[in-house]
Image (cartoon, rainbow, N blue to C red):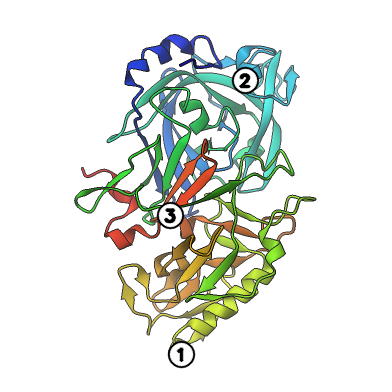
Amino acid sequence: MTFKFPLPMLLLFLLLNIFLCSSEVLYLPVTKDASTLQYITEVSQRTPLIPIKLLVHLGGRSLWVDCDKGFKSSTYKPGVCNSTQCTYSNPNTCGDCILKPKLQPGCNNNSCYIWGENPLIDWFDDSAEIADDVLVIGSTPGVRVTWPRFIFACFVSRNMVRLLANGVTGIAGFGRESPISIPNQLALDPRFTKKFGICLSSSTTSPGVIFIGSGPYYVYNPKKIDISNDIIYTKLIANKNSFLVTQEYYIQVSSIKIVGQDIPLNKTLLSINKKDIDGGTRISTASPYTILHPSIYDAFKTAFINALPKNVALVESPMKQFGLCFSSKNIKITNVGPDVPVIDVVLHKPSAFWRIYGTNSVVQVSKDVMCLAFVKQDEEREPSIVIGGHQLEENLLIFDLPGKKIGFSSSLKLQQTSCAQYDNI
């Protein structure tokens, strides 16, 4: 088998691993930040190594870090124009840096630059310098990898770190097509494949995990179980309407049911608008809650209210973002959370659906008040549905890039385990 490598110096490093070409799994812990609800991971980078915290962004083109101040590394190498490193990264421009009075990491002459993004502020910047440096990634119980020249983007624009959680200095990009996204670079190592699973924890004290590799993906209950077995797959849909969204993950949603009944929807909203970048359904780790197009939200909210038990009283929302709240005094608690109407997101066919239970559909905002954890879209030119973090928690999502498909489990609480139980220590 022949492998094409972006950097010749990686050849020896990778050949040393050929004998390990049976698939392995890298475990990347992910912590939910209590104040911002952002999903944060940590890697080590540079020489000498230092830990850096990164926001997990499914649609991110690359790993990027803030290089504006204090970036020091003896192994930092900027991407020189027309170099293999530069060409492999698909840069948008090449030239000299004019952003700083003197040269520094992130601002060098005769260097290549790519677009980077901060999904929290919907901001794109074309001044990210391509570079490579040492990266150490992974934790027990999986493998831990030291990558001597991992390609990343280096920003000197302070605007890019706006709204990131305290201590977070960049983005961990898992974009589907970018050759320099985290899963696509790691797949150059024959131990891994272009396949990964995300299992976000609902706890702010016990981390969840991203599994990188083909599997199996193990958690404990307390016995060791492979949670990648019982999965519903659906096709990954490409959105080619803009280069800014080609890294994102879109799926087909054909309908939404509440307690088995279809809610009335304008079905044209469920498809990507070929003349624009709106419509369709995107999966996002950057949004804390699922966002629905106004007409979808209104129908969804009405159907949910009608399905609530008659002894449950609606109350005024104590938080502006939530449009439906109710008293939790008469809501029973089950093994899958509050006993509220079950939601089915129907995918490409009626028998393929992702079931959402109370643990993922509502949020307890005070002692006696729960709110529907879906919010109404307030911007135009957006996907009609953005599936957010709260709905993803304690579920396993498998992203099979070669197979162009995404797999959904249902709540791991059904198996009496959680995403935090990936390590039995």
Give the residue at mark 3: 34
User: Which class describes the residues within 10 Å of circle 2: few (<14), some (14-19), or many (20+)?
Assistant: some
In the image, 376: left or right of 92?
left
Q: Going by the picture, which residue comes out furthest to the right?
A: 275
Residue 402, position in %: x, y? 52, 35
Q: Secondary structure at mark 3?
A: loop
The residue positioned 28% from the left and 56% from the top of the image is 417
Give the residue at mark 1: 310
Name the residue type under label 2: Tyr
Residue 241 in view: yes
Residue 315 in view: no
> Of callouts 1 and 2, which one flags the residue occurring earlier in the amino acid sequence?
2
Q: State whether residue 259 is above or below residue 80.
A: below
Name the residue type under label 3: Ala
> Of callouts 3 and 2, which one flags the residue occurring earlier in the amino acid sequence?
3
Name the foreground residue: 138 vs 411: 411
Q: State whether residue 313 is above or below residue 57.
A: below
> Of callouts 1 and 3, which one flags the residue occurring earlier in the amino acid sequence?
3
Name the residue type under label 1: Lys
Q: Are marks 1 and 2 in contact (CB under 8 Å)?
A: no
Give the residue at mark 2: 88
- Between disc 3 and disc 2, the foreground one is 2
